[in-house]
Image (cartoon, rainbow, N blue to C red):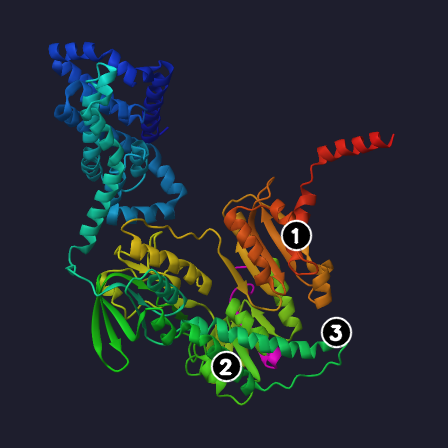
């Protein structure tokens, strides 16, 4: 046995012996208010006769109790006030508690830190970096909140890289105010001689202060944080606006709408197009194209419905014209005129944050103006990522942002189309263009397309696309472009893929540059760092949508916008934590893929126990009549319960079917509730009820059914 191991064993033995003695000898019975009152006179006499002995013994008891993380520190703090009075009691309790906490800190570090580092090396490293940067502030925050168990703080901090002197000083400073409040309450407890004393103003005041202290501590933490963050800025005396919103996509529009609804003075700044990416280059045009592609597919497949099939005559310019008309139909809902009528001051130009309360706007005519505002919401959205592949830009690579204008100029659909990326956008476009007549090759570097879905879902859609003529090359990296040819490589072998157009759909990134964030010290790595209230480094600057993450969905941006708007406008009174527990998404292939909650892979990765319930659409009456009976509903359910942990639906209209499970998961409705709900016949929605029925069959009460069988046999005679 090494010396270090022997030392650890000895210290652990001493700690365990102390804890065992405390409980076996029932020493906790002495650390109660009743015991304190019973010995009050005796302790007072001893204090007068031998003050050093009493002070020293009390300090030693306090240090040992704290060092061993035993219950009773609160009673000892009250006792310090009852025995020694306010100022001497506070002095004794403050130093004794800090010293005991430091011993617990050292014990935790010596006994456990090496083991924790070996088991959770990467996580510990990240925590240590955070402690090095802001450890004293984190510790002070925890010390100011008496509701948080201090012994856990001692043990947890011992596992970090915080230095002992820092821990001691911050702990004593952070606990001082709380110690003072508790000692003061103890001085009043010592004066209770009769029931009438309970109603004394001094005692009532002490307990009111004790009850208000957590609120006071929270306020002090906020004040300290604000002063620390804003110290290099000068706050305006008055403000031009209650709120300035940067970006008029889904997140910004909803934020501005809410602000105007509650009569706040709000300015919305948009540098490009009202409606953002979703309306102009994302969801709306892509779904319009997908609809045209589905019609072409139905014409080609009409023989399945008793109608003579034919090859559709696709007019690509007409399709693109319809895409533009769809956008134009929806655009008024997101327009400057509508939002102006709602009471929003809309500015078309580029916004830059000058300081935490000032936004500079460069309008499209070259004018510059500045607005002061109490709060700012950044909703600048995202943009497609174009990888640094040799020759890619020179080949005229398109993204979801640029493809619509480029394709609108074509007289015919691209004969040869290469799509780089196997995510939802790439997969949707691969199927749509193949149905419209392009020879589509989809290149994905990973082992399968749609990697965020379960493997069987990915395999299902892969089979569908390949049957429709899409060439899918998984495990292939896009290496370079030579003219109008993409060179893709797999296992040291290269494949030349000639194209007329190439679309790159390998992901999106947040728009973070050009808004003055760097000058303010706001982190701008992949997304803005925000807390649960969507606040950035500065509590009055919020973010929502793609710039905040963690999801890049239009509906998610709109969901976050509510929290950003309400917290920005009313956060002085109450803030709300953004709720991400139930986030659905849909991939608009045919059939669609809709998902919410856990998949099998994510549940296994998180160690969540589950049962799989599956219902195939092969015998769903409406699906059969529609010729859409390939697909399934798959549920992840808590073992032995009817609680839905996740749902994946592969079906025509899966995005619509998913809503029932989203509602159930959000509001705690189990499969029994779904099974007991009448679903219209014949509808695709019956699939949800039948899936619940599959769960019920798999979890039927066998013992009860055996008794039922006996009962019925008895009834038959």
Q: Residue at x 51, y 70 (%)?
A: 425
Q: CA distance from mark 3 to mark 2?
A: 30 Å
Mark 2 secondary-structure assignment: helix
Ranked by sequence position, the earlier of labels 3 and 1 is: 3
Is 460 in the magenta? no
Mark 1 secondary-structure assignment: loop
Residue 317, by quadrant, is: bottom right
- Depth check, mark 3 against mark 1: the one in front is 1
* Crowd class of label 1 (few under 14; some 14 to 19; many from 20; radius 10 Å): few
Q: Residue at x 57, y 43 (%)?
A: 638
Q: CA distance from mark 3 to mark 1?
A: 30 Å
Residue bounds of the magenta highlight: 434-453
Left or right: 109 in relation to 555:
left
- Depth check, mark 2 against mark 1: the one in front is 1
Residue 691 in the image: x percent, y percent? 66, 52
Q: Toward the viewer: 206 or 159?
A: 206
* Picture mark count: 3
Location of mark 2 (residue): 325
Location of mark 1 (residue): 678
Residue 181 in the image: x percent, y percent? 20, 30
Location of mark 3 (residue): 305
Ranked by sequence position, the earlier of labels 2 and 1 is: 2
* Crowd class of label 3 (few under 14; some 14 to 19; many from 20; radius 10 Å): few
């Amino acid at each position: 046995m090494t010396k270090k191991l022997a030392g650890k064993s000895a210290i652990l033995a001493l700690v365990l012996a102390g804890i065992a003695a405390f409980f076996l000898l029932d020493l906790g019975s002495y650390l109660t208010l009743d015991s304190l009152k019973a010995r009050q006179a005796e302790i007072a006499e001893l204090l007068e006769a031998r003050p050093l002995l009493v002070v020293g013994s009390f300090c030693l008891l306090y240090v040992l109790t704290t060092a061993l993380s035993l219950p009773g520190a609160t009673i000892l703090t009250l006792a310090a006030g009852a025995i020694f009075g306010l100022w001497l009691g506070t002095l004794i309790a403050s130093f004794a508690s800090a010293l005991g906490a430091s011993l617990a800190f050292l014990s935790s570090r010596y006994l456990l830190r090496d083991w924790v580092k070996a088991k959770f090396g990467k996580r510990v490293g990240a925590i240590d970096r955070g402690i090095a940067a802001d450890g004293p502030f984190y510790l002070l925050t925890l010390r100011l909140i008496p509701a948080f168990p201090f012994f856990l703080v001692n043990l947890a901090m011992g596992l970090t890289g915080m230095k002992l002197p820092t821990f001691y000083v911050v702990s004593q400073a952070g606990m001082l105010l709380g110690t003072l409040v508790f000692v003061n309450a103890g001085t009043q407890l010592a004066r209770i001689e009769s029931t009438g004393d309970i109603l004394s103003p001094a005692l009532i005041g002490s307990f009111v202060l004790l009850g208000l202290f957590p609120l006071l501590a929270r306020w002090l933490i906020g004040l300290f944080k604000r002063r620390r963050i804003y110290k290099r800025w000068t706050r305006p005396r008055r403000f031009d606006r209650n709120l300035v919103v940067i970006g008029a996509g889904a997140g910004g529009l909803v934020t501005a709408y809410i602000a105007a609804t509650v009569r706040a003075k709000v300015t919305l700044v948009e540098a490009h197009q009202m409606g953002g990416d979703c309306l102009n280059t994302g969801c709306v045009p892509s779904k319009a194209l997908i609809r045209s592609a589905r019609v072409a597919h139905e014409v080609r497949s009409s023989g399945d419905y008793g109608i003579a099939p034919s090859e559709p005559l696709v007019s690509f310019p007409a399709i693109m014209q319809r895409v533009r008309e769809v956008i134009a139909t929806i655009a008024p809902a997101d327009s400057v005129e509508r939002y102006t009528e709602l009471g929003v001051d809309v500015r078309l130009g580029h916004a830059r944050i000058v300081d935490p309360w000032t936004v500079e706007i460069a309008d499209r005519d070259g004018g510059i103006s500045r607005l002061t505002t109490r709060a700012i919401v950044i909703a600048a959205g995202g943009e497609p990522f174009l990888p640094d592949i040799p020759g890619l830009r020179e080949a005229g690579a398109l993204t979801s942002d640029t493809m619509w204008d480029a394709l609108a100029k074509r007289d015919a659909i691209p004969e040869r189309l290469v799509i780089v990326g196997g995510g939802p956008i790439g997969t949707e476009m691969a199927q749509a263009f193949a149905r419209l007549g392009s020879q589509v090759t989809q290149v994905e570097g990973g082992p399968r397309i749609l990697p965020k879905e379960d493997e069987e879902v990915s395999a299902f859609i892969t089979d569908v696309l390949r049957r429709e003529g899409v060439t899918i090359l998984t495990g292939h990296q896009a290496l370079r472009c030579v003219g109008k040819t993409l060179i893709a490589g797999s296992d040291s072998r290269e494949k030349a893929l000639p194209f007329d157009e190439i679309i790159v759909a390998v992901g999106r990134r947040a728009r973070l540059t050009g808004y003055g964030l760097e000058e303010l010290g706001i982190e701008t790595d992949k997304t803005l760092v925000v807390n649960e209230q969507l606040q950035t480094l500065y509590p009055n600057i919020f973010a929502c949508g793609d710039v905040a993450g963690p999801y890049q969905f239009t509906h998610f941006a709109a969901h976050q916008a509510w929290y950003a708007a309400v917290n920005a406008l009313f956060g002085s009174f109450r803030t709300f934590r953004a709720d991400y527990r139930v986030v659905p998404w849909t991939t608009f292939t045919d059939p669609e893929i809709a998902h919410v909650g856990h998949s099998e892979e994510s549940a296994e990765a998180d160690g969540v126990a589950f049962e799989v319930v599956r219902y195939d659409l092969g015998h769903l009456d409406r699906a059969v009549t529609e010729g859409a009976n390939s697909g399934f509903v798959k549920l992840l359910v808590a073992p032995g319960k009817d609680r839905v942990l996740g749902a994946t639906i592969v079906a025509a209209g899966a995005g619509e079917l998913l809503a029932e499970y989203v509602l159930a998961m959000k509001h705690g409705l189990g499969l029994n509730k779904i099974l007991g709900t009448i679903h219209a016949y014949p509808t695709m929605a019956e699939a949800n009820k039948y899936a619940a029925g599959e769960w019920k069959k798999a979890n039927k009460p066998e013992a009860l059914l055996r008794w039922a069988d006996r009962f019925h046999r008895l009834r038959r005679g």
